[in-house]
Image (cartoon, grey):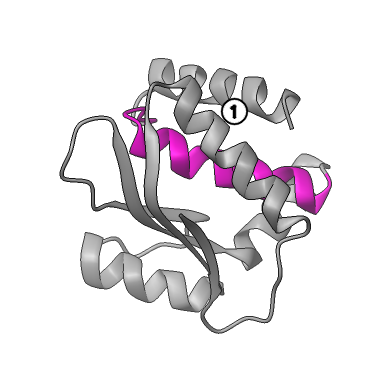
Amino acid sequence: MIHFFNEDVDFKVSHPRKTKAWLKSIAKAESYEVNQLNYIFCSDEYLLTINQQYLNHDFYTDIITFDNSEEEGIVEGDIFISLDRIRENANELNKPFEEELFRVLAHGVLHLVGYDDINDEQELEMREKEDLYLSQL
């Protein structure tokens, strides 16, 4: 099950059924199955508070992913996404808002199936995976 929630913003994902099927297909391609995945859309300020409280980071970010899975091969998690960051990043990268949004949606799933982006090599691998899955949308 994949759910979309809003915290302090008013937002709806376009084509939610198609989007959920696409997100499940990413997990499946990585040999995972989605059990429970919650996307929570919010503002910069809301996500900054989460970043400070749970990760001891004092900076804005576009996404924070909490892995709640207890079983190998199963995706369970909560993914918080700042729509303010998505808009700003899309403008800076000269990309449509929706393209950047879908990149970040995929990014969250990729974190939950084991990809990281701490160093340059991992970040490159993550970008390649995001591009691959975006091309399948």
Q: Residue 66: horizontal and vertical position, in percent?
A: 30, 54
- Is 136 on the left or on the right of 111, as rendered? right
In the depicted structure, whether residue 63 falls above or below residue 43: above
Residue 107 x %, y %: 51, 39
Q: Which amino acid type is shown beneath numbered disc 1?
A: Glu
In the displayed structure, would residue 124 be above or below residue 87?
Answer: above
Tell me the quarter of the image containing the C terminus: top right
Q: Secondary structure at mark 1?
A: helix
Q: What range of the chain is rendered magenta?
A: 96-117
Q: Is residue 36 left or right of residue 129?
A: left
Mark 1 residue crowding within 10 angstroms, few (<14) / some (14–19) / many (20+):
many
Residue at the left extreme of this rendering: 70
Residue 105 % position (x, y): 57, 47
- Between 85 and 74, the residue placed more toward the observer is 74
How many marks are shown on the rendered structure?
1
> Where does label 1 land, which residue?
130
Q: Is residue 56 visible?
A: no
* Of residues 46 and 18, the one drawn nearer to the viewer in this rendering: 18
